[in-house]
Amino acid sequence: MATQHHAHAAHPRKQGEEPWEHENPRDAEGKPHQHLSATQKASAKRHAEAAGRPYPNLVDNMREAAKAHGRPAADSVNKKHAKR
């Protein structure tokens, strides 16, 4: 079954391109990095544990950052990597 990727409109991804395969767009725009709050970190850790990982990965952290800005998280990406 093919997995559909739902990327933010400002940064569309090519099929097969993963978030860790390209530079952080905030670096290119000269903006400071965004840090997760303690609540966001705890939520990312819960998602990781539910997926069988001992600690959150980039996708878990990106999901929390997106939720903070009212953007939908790309659940299909998380499900794809959770099966590993």
Image: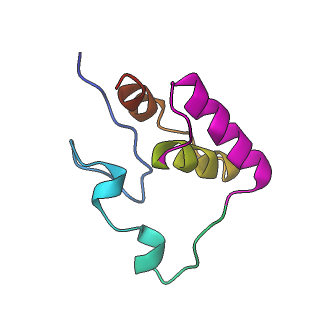
Instruction: Let me know if residue 38 is in the magenta part.
Output: yes
Residue 61: image x %, image y %?
56, 48
Q: Which corner quadrant of the image does residue 48 belong to?
A: top right
Residue 27 higher or lower than 82, as above or below? below
Residue 71: image x %, image y %?
59, 46
Q: Which residues are magenta?
A: 36-57
Residue 59 higher or lower than 47, as above or below? below
> Which residue is more in the foreground, 75 or 54?
54
Query: In this view, which residue lies farthest toward the top?
Result: 1
> Which residue is more in the foreground, 45 or 74?
45
Count of numbered badges drawn on the protein: 0
Residue 36: image x %, image y %?
68, 57
> Which residue is more in the foreground, 27 or 53?
53
Query: In this view, which residue lies farthest toward the right?
Result: 39
Q: Residue at x 58, y 78 (%)?
A: 32
In screen coordinates, is 13 left or right of 7? Answer: left
Q: Residue at x 62, y 67 (%)?
A: 34
Residue 44 higher or lower than 12, as above or below? above
Q: Residue at x 21, y 42 (%)?
A: 15
Q: Residue at x 69, y 48 (%)?
A: 41
Identify the image quadrant of the C terminus: top left
Identify the image quadrant of the N terminus: top left
In screen coordinates, is 76 left or right of 71? Answer: left
In screen coordinates, is 23 left or right of 50? Answer: left
